[in-house]
Image (tube, grey):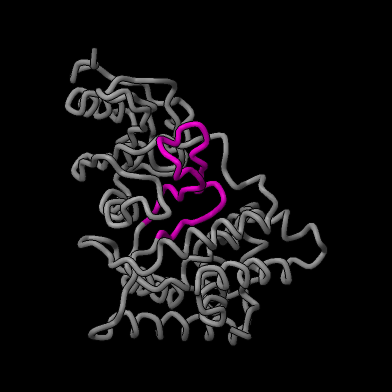
Amino acid sequence: MTPAATSTWPVPPAFLEVVRRSDPTLAAWAPGAGEDAAALADRWQLTPDGDPLHGWMAVVWPVVDQHGRRLMLKIAGPDPLGQGEGAALAAWQGRGTVRLHRRDPEARAVLLDRLDPARDLFDVPIDDACAVIGDLLADLVGVEPPAGVVSMADELDDWLVRLDRVPAGQQVLPTALVDRARSTIADHVAELRRPGAHLELLHYDLHYLNVLHTSQYATDDAGGWRAIDPLPMAGRREWELIALLRNRWPDAEAGGDPDRALRRRLDQVCERAGVDRSLARACAQAAAVDNLLTVLPGNVDSMFNPPFAVMALWTDG
């Protein structure tokens, strides 16, 4: 039997603690997420099928539907970047991404194919992992953004405002690097807002933990790697590489030349996905400058500081 709509499904205590420490808006929403899950399960005829999982902004419950299919019910918190996930997955239609079965935009809920949560790209050799992401990105690019997806131009406008507010005494990077970042950002805003500009649907968080394998859950012969957890935007594909460059820093350090290692990642993915290397390097440099000056100050222990410190110096894009 399906659970009654008035029941409550469990929300992982670890998730409640994460959002309590990181985001007041998510912390206010999270305790009621289990009630939303139970109500959707009643409406969609789902039964629970294991312990819930969580990331930074959402909870995912393993479920079985009325046809016996093992699926995942995901409900996300009220974060603007995550609002368009259902629409984005519907636009991709399973091309490179986890397949969408149902969605409820008001509840920020999606019903998805079940993938293997224990099989991601974090421990796959870095060259192989980049090859997988490059191939997935080749499948993702070129899709027209659905209505309501966040505009990359608006996001980049916010970056420019943040950079302009950095006090002169706190600008820890050479002026030439900051000016280069500002120029890249301003150029992209102008291009994205140009009448007739070609915009693509971006995943915008395509890193190693956001790619899972179908493993034993594949329902046909089309098993393999799938992208999950997009933060959908309407923009240009060159911005897609930032997440994979900033993650797995120990792998970049291991060979003794992190700059070369990060450039190799970028080159591999650009070649497989048809992304312009020069523009991708410029976008990475701009993102690094923005993060180092406006997002990460005061967080000296952030794992993103070292890779961004390398990418901020990229002036040959």
Residue 91 in sight in this render: yes
Relative to 247, say whether 19 is above or below.
Answer: above
Residue 167 in sight in this render: no
Depth order, front residue of 270/194: 270
Horizontal side, residue 279 vs residue 77: left or right:
right
At x 35%, y 40%, the residue is: 26
Relative to 178, say whether 27 is above or below.
Answer: above
Depth order, front residue of 150/180: 150
At x 43%, y 26%, the residue is: 12
Q: Position of residue 83 (x, y in %)?
A: 28, 51
Residue 211 is inside the magenta segment: yes
Horizontal side, residue 306 vs residue 61: left or right:
right
Quarter occupied by residue 57? top left
Which quadrant, please, contains the C terminus? bottom right
- What span is in magenta? 203-231
Quarter occupied by residue 260? bottom right
At x 32%, y 79%, the residue is: 192
Relative to 253, say whether 170 is above or below.
Answer: below
Q: Position of residue 71 (x, y in %)?
A: 36, 31
Q: Position of residue 188 (x, y in %)?
A: 39, 81
Which quadrant, please, contains the N terminus? top left
Horizontal side, residue 18 vs residue 76: left or right:
right
Quarter occupied by residue 37? top left
At x 29%, y 63%, the residue is: 150
Q: Position of residue 178 (x, y in %)?
A: 55, 81
Q: Residue furthest front?
A: 221
